[in-house]
Image (cartoon, helix red, strand yellow):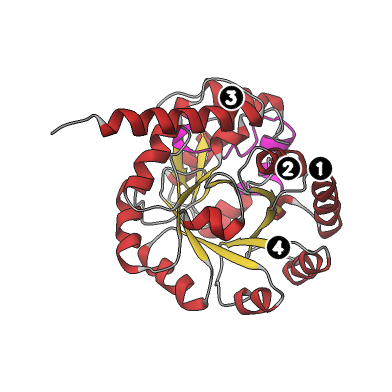
């Protein structure tokens, strides 16, 4: 028995991260068709674009899929209404208060999961009535926790105190790391960076290649005063570091960030001036593959690790 497989009615307890500029209907449907749970990333979509992706995803798969909704974005009410109108059955919320929409979404028959980066927020999410939580260590890409708690530490801490299903995220790109976090108490995993480097991800090919080329130490968590984000080190990142050396105000950081900086980098492929969000685990990603191959390798590696660990003695 696996609580995540049962909750979502999926073959494997693997959820694809709903990443901005990477998670369109092609990626979500490919993950769902391969036995996981695909998520459309609403954070980089206008409401009408989100509706289009949901409709295309319904045509591309007859398996369960969901929508990831960062709650710090504008048009939030409109996005929620579209999700309900289109009959989406799974919603992952993040970057906001889970009490805002959880009970309303659940009243519409929607399964709700909230992404957290700390023990405190895991408890608040459970109290808000969510069906499961994603506990994300600071290794992860994208928006992140300020406390820099690693996945290896966060998962067992959260497991001790919550009763609802637990999904691990941050630094997971292989079957071995999936086995590791599940041995610490996770019921399933959410994987982002590995799926960025997939054929079906909507992010720019040049960004995908930069992820593949990344080595240890090529990412850094920064911009905590705005919203913590892990960035690949490019010219924009160096500009951020130079500004930090002068003790900037929040207004100066916002001015440097500007508008559409993430779109410029991850979607349009500007590797110099763009904001390039990715996890530390990019150092382990060495190729761009179709989702089906990524999923098969994850499962094979998980089974091989399980078999190996059953023979380990101490």
Which of labels 4 and 3 is toward the front?
Answer: 4
Question: In front: mark 3 or mark 2?
Answer: 2
| Residue tagged 3 | 210
Please tell me whether mark 1 sits on a helix, a strand or a loop: helix
Which secondary structure, mark 3?
Answer: helix
Residue depth check, mark 1 versus mark 3: number of the one nearer the observer: 1
Q: CA distance from mark 4 to mark 3?
A: 34 Å
Write down the residue under mark 4.
Answer: 89
Instruction: Give the x, y percent position of residue 176.
Output: 39, 33
- Calculate the distance from the C-alpha at mark 4 to the C-alpha at mark 1: 16 Å
Q: Earlier in the sequence, mark 1 or mark 3?
A: 1
Residue on which the image places disc 1: 60
- Labels 4 & 1 near each other (Cβ < 8 A): no
Disc 2/disc 4 C-alpha distance (Å): 14 Å
Answer with mark 2 or mark 4, whichever residue precedes in sequence.
2
Q: Which residue is mark 2?
A: 29
Q: Marks 3 and 1: in contact by CB < 8 Å?
A: no
Q: CA distance from mark 1 to mark 3?
A: 29 Å
Residue name at image x 63 percent, y 65 percent: 71
- The reply to whether dot 1 and dot 2 touch (C-beta < 8 Å) is yes
Label 3, label 2: how far apart the Cα atoms are: 24 Å
Q: Over which residues does the magenta segment extend?
A: 256-282
Left or right of 187 in this view: 314? left
Q: Foreground residue, 267 or 69?
A: 69
Mark 4 or mark 3, earlier in chain: 4
Q: In which quarter of the view is residue 220 placed?
A: top left
Q: CA distance from mark 1 to mark 2?
A: 6 Å
Left or right for 129, reference 275: left
Nearer the N terminus, badge 1 or badge 2?
2
Which badge, 4 or 1, comes first in the chain's sequence? 1
């Amino acid at each position: 028995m696996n609580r995540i497989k049962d909750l979502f009615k999926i073959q494997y307890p693997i959820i694809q991260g709903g990443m901005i500029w990477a998670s369109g209907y092609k990626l979500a449907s490919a993950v769902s068709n391969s036995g996981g749970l695909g998520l459309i990333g609403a954070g980089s979509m206008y409401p009408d674009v989100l509706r289009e992706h949901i409709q295309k995803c319904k045509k591309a798969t007859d398996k369960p899929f969901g929508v990831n909704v960062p709650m710090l974005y504008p048009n939030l009410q409109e996005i929620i209404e579209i999700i309900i109108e289109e009959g989406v059955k799974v919603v992952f919320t993040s970057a906001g208060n889970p009490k805002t929409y959880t009970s309303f979404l659940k009243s519409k028959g929607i399964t709700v999961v909230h992404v957290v980066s700390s023990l405190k927020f895991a408890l608040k999410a459970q109290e808000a009535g969510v069906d499961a939580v994603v506990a994300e260590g600071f290794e992860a890409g994208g928006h992140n926790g300020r406390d820099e708690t690693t996945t290896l530490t966060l998962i067992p801490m959260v497991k001790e105190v919550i009763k609802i299903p637990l999904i691990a995220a941050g630094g997971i790109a292989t079957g071995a790391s999936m086995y590791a976090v599940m041995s610490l108490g996770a019921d399933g995993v959410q994987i982002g960076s590995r799926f960025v480097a997939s054929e079906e991800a909507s992010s720019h090919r040049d960004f995908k290649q930069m992820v593949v080329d990344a080595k240890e130490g090529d990412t850094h968590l920064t911009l905590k005063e705005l919203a913590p984000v892990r960035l690949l080190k490019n010219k924009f990142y160096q500009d951020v570091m130079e500004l930090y050396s002068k003790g900037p105000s929040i207004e100066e950081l916002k001015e440097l960030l500007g508008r559409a900086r993430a779109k410029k980098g991850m979607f349009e492929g500007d590797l110099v001036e763009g904001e390039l969000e990715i996890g530390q685990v990019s150092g382990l990603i060495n190729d761009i593959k179709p989702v089906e191959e990524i999923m098969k390798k994850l499962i094979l590696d998980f089974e091989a690790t399980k078999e190996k660990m059953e023979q380990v003695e101490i």
